[in-house]
Structure formats: structure tokens, C-alpha cells
Amino acid sequence: MCSGNAFFLFTSLALLGHAVAQTIQIGRNVIAVLDNLKSLQLSNASFFDFGPTGKVYSSGMCKPAPGDADWPSPDTWNTLNLLTGGALISTVPLGAACFQGEHYDAVRCAVILERWDDPHLHAEDPTSVMNPLYQGATCMPQNAATGGTCEIGGSASYSVNVSTVSQVQLAVNFARNTGVRLIVHNTGHDYMGKSTGANALSIWTRNLRTIEFIEKYSSSASAWTGSAFKLGAGVQVWELLAAANDKGVSVLTGECPTVGVAGGYIAGGGMGPLSSKYGLAVDHVLSLDVVTPDGNFVTADQKNNADLFWALRGGGGGTFGVVTSVTVRTLPKMKIAGLTLSITIGPNGDVSETLFWEAITGWWRRFPDYVKQGSYAYSIILPTADGGLSWALTPWIVPDMSLDQFKAMTVDLRAEWERIGFNINLDFFETENFYDAWTNHFPSDTVGVPNLRTASRLIPSENWVNPSLLDDTVMFIQRAVRNGSSLIGYNIRAAPVADAPASATVPIWRDTTMFAIVGTMWDATLPNTEVDTINQRITKDWTASLRSLTPGGGTYSNEADVMDPDFQQAFYGYDNYQRLTTIKQAFDPWGLFYAPTGVGSETWSVTDQQGYVLKQTGKLCKK
């Protein structure tokens, strides 16, 4: 056996049907691999041809499923496995360890049950997703003890555990030429069902996790000469923030630890705790390395593949190719000041519901001034089981601000709260860098709930300029919470970044004052008719109401209503969407990459749907 990575070159051009031989890393015995390839006689070598070959779908045609005549044979799948160096994984659902059968493992099951709400558990599995609703929740380990079943559902049939670009190219070419559905799965931190799909081949990018610090960046495509990080696609927020702190710099990321920075996060624009001061993650991208739908490996930056560079930054994940790495510029080390608070009120408490809303509304009314100073607030309002309400602010921060400055900024609010009798403990803090603030004052992420859906909207400054519009906005939020919704409300905007190249991000981000997410859970034992009623309320009431309050606006496409009937405007903006569609057709005429609410997704449908939410459990068919 070879130690480390063994390299071999396929010099027979006919073997892969490409004009340039591809170097492939195989961590295996080269002789054994070649012997196996010879024994297969490579009658299916054309499945690995580079574009422009590929299967094109016309109206009514569906991508194949196991058992269909055009589903690849076991020998064909075995060829893919050999060419990728044994990286092909046949899906076994994460929860299968809890069900009687060949995969039952009592010890493993106990660990899974204990850690099911831990995002790190799901991030290290090739097909598990943190929101199992869109997968169909077909193998929930909690159900094993009560006679439940475990099925593959909306999970991919196979995954390629990629650690090299060549493996990505092989998987892309294979899916395009066989017609098998293709998805990109990074960490599974996905609220929109983009990283799962029945009958699919999944490219699992989590193990593309190198982090390279570049002290002085130099490229003819950018004027940036400061420091930068080059990240593999699988690098998570917690890994990058730790690396940045070690180097004495900051980077703009999301707040959830298991978000894949170079994956859907940047593809959706990338908001984070530093956005009100430093813009979106896409504003700091210098270049992206990507395998395009034809199987080629290219770099996209301001000079090379400029259309792709624009589209990959805000145009949505799983749509234009597979990003294998991204280079982002750094920000200076910065002081952080902020506070946290929490309060729960009940029917017999000292704080009435009227006072509760008066205090929060007083805070909201000051949002325009706060956000101009760089404010980022993460606020959650929840209805409680006894008819009360809870509010947690975890946290509210401002970068590049001292604690004294933060207290001065909030003095009027605190005086108003004292005047109206809203007495609450405020835990102020100050840190010397963002990493310490993030580590000590941001909440942990909990996942794995199969009966939860959300809708969202970016609330623009106009809703604060117009007093009646602000009143209507507040009244909607109160009504939604009374009807069972939670509210995650951010004080945030995407600050303009003077030297940032244009991106496909929905334009309303630059004029946002609040990002509002409404959502609800339901009892998993409810009949489908009641579940349908709850879910229809999310789209037909809450999403529709938010749209009417913010005409011509939009939302953050990574955390939105997957059933939004006007997602083209809401997630991208019509002008952007028109250009994105043109780029999609140029790079992917085969329709290889499909993602729900992604560019071009309106021309596809998934079979066997219940109606109230788009799950990825059926066949993918061309409309």
C-alpha cells in the first residue's frame, strides 16, 4: 500500500474522452486500481467525457431512479468508485443505527440520540441534513423505539467523498452523461432543501478543508494587497474564525459554527455579525475555484470568467457548478462591545404583554440609527406554553466600539425603558477581538427538527421613514407571534463596501434596517390536513404580508420561504434574475444543477409532493 496520496496519470486520452490527461489522487495501491479497471474493459468510459456531451431533458422527462432502465448499472457505479479512488459512498441514513437490521448498532444509536440536535454530528455525515423536513424525515432515530421505519427518502443514493478537484470533475461528468440527478452537499447546514435529493449523486465537499493564510495577496485581477485566506469548500465558520484569530485578523462569516463558508453561505450572499459595518461576505471574495457543469476546472475573479464570478456571489448555491475553494480578504482585528438580555413574561407576571411590546417597539424604532453605527442584534421572541412570551437578545454587538461608546449609544433606550417601568438585567461585555465575543456571547446552534418552517423578509429603511408603515410592520409581527410564530429579528444591513465588485446579491440588502424571520413548529402527530393549514399560513399569510409591507423588496435566500411564489424577485431581484438565467443557460445547458428556488428551478418539478412544502423525496422531472 502507498503511504499518503498516490498520484497516477491517465495518459490514454480515449479513457476519459478528454483532450487533456487528468491527474487524479488515489490514496490506494495503484497497481490494484489499474488491474480492476482492465477487468471492467471500460465499456462505460464515455460516462466520464467532458462537455459538451451530456444528457438533455425535454418536457415530461424525469431523471432516473434505481430500478429504471436508464439507472447506471452496478458495474458503472463501480467504475466511478474506482476512478475516484474508492471515494463513492452508498447511502446509509445517519439514524439507521437505531433500527433493527444490518446497520443496527446500539452503542452508535445512543450517541446519535444524545447528539441529534448537535450540528457537528450531521456535518460529519455525507448525507444528513440539519433540517430533515426537506429530506422527508424518513429515518428519525427517535422513532425506532415506537415502531418507526428507516428509509432513504430524499437522501442521495450515492455520495462522492471528494478530497481533490479531479474527483469533483469525475462526479460532474458522470452525472451529466448518465443523467443522474446531481447535488452538492457540504455540511448539511441548509434551510432550503438544496443539499439533499432522492435518486441523486451527491458531491460531498466537507473534506475539502484546507486553510491557507496569504500574508500579502497579489493578483492582476484585484487591487487588494493585504492579507487573505484561501479556503477549501468544506471549511466551517468555527474553523475559519479560529484561524483568523491565530493570525491576529478578522474575517466576515456567519455566526453559526457549522456553516460552510465557501459553500451555500457565499453563494447566497453571506450575512454575518460584522455586516452592518463591513458588508456581506461576497464583498470580500477575491476569487473562486470552481468545476463548471461541463467538468472543467476554472478560476473566477474580476478578470477571468467575470460573469461566473458575479453569479457565484449571491446567485444561489448548487446552481452554477461546484466551488472547490474561495479566497477572501481579511479585516483588521477589532474591539467588540455589546450586551445580552433575556426575559419571559406570563399571565401573572410583573411585566404585562402591553409593556413587553412597548419596550421592544422602542428598541425597534431606534434601529436606523443603530445600524448606521454598525449594530448587529440577534433577537428571538417566542410564545410560551402558558400563553406568555419570551425575548432573548443573544447578543447585540457593535464592532470597532468600546463599551463606554456602546453604553452611550444605548443611553436613550435604557432611559425610556426605566421610564415606562421595563426593568430588565442587561449584561454588558467588551472583548479585544471578534473571536472572543463570538465564542463567549453567541448562542449554540440546535438542529434536527423535522417539523419546522420559516419565512423571512429584509425590512428596508422606508418602513422607518414612514410612521404608519412602521406601525403596520410592528402590528404584523405582533399578530404573527400571537398566531404561533416565533420571530428572529436582526438589526442588520449590508453596509456598502466602496471597492467591492458588483455581485448577484439581492439589492435591497444595502437599504435594510431589519431582517425578520417568522416561523413555526407543529406537532408531528397532526393529520396532514392540519399540517397543511399551518404551512399554508406561512406562505399565504406571513410571506404575503411581509411582501405587501415591503413592495419591491426581497430577502436573504439562504433563510427564506421555500414556497415563496415570487422567489425570483424576493431572492435575487428581477434584473439580477434575468442575467443569472442567461449565465445559467450558457454554463449549464443540460440542467445538470438543480436546487429548489435556484436559478432555473421553475422549469423542474419533484414528483409525489404533499402540496404544502417542497420536499426532495420524489423524481426530478422537466416541466
Image (cartoon, rainbow, N blue to C red):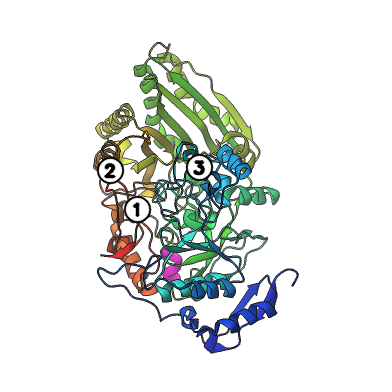
Secondary structure mainly formed by the magenta segment = helix
| CB-based contact (under 8 Å), mark 2 and mark 3 | no
Residue 311 within the magenta-colored segment of the rendering: yes
Q: Quadrant of residue 449?
A: top left
The earlier-in-sequence mark between 2 and 1 is 2
Residue situated in front as seen by the camera: 80 or 294:
80
Residue situated in front as seen by the camera: 584 or 201:
201
x, y (%) of residue 103? 56, 51
Residue situated in front as seen by the camera: 508 or 402:
508
Residue situated in front as seen by the camera: 81 or 371:
81
- Which circle, 2 or 3, is nearer the viewer? 3
Give SS at disc 2.
helix
* Residue where numbered disc 1 is placed: 571
Residue 341: assigned label: none
Locate the C terminus by quadrant: bottom left
Give SS at disc 1.
helix
Residue 539: assigned label: 2
Amino acid at pointer 3: Pro
**Would you say residue 287 is visible in this rendering?**
no
* Residue where numbered disc 3 is placed: 141
Indicate left or right for 422 with 254 as reference. left
Residue 502 within the magenta-colored segment of the rendering: no
The earlier-in-sequence mark between 3 and 1 is 3
Give SS at disc 3.
helix
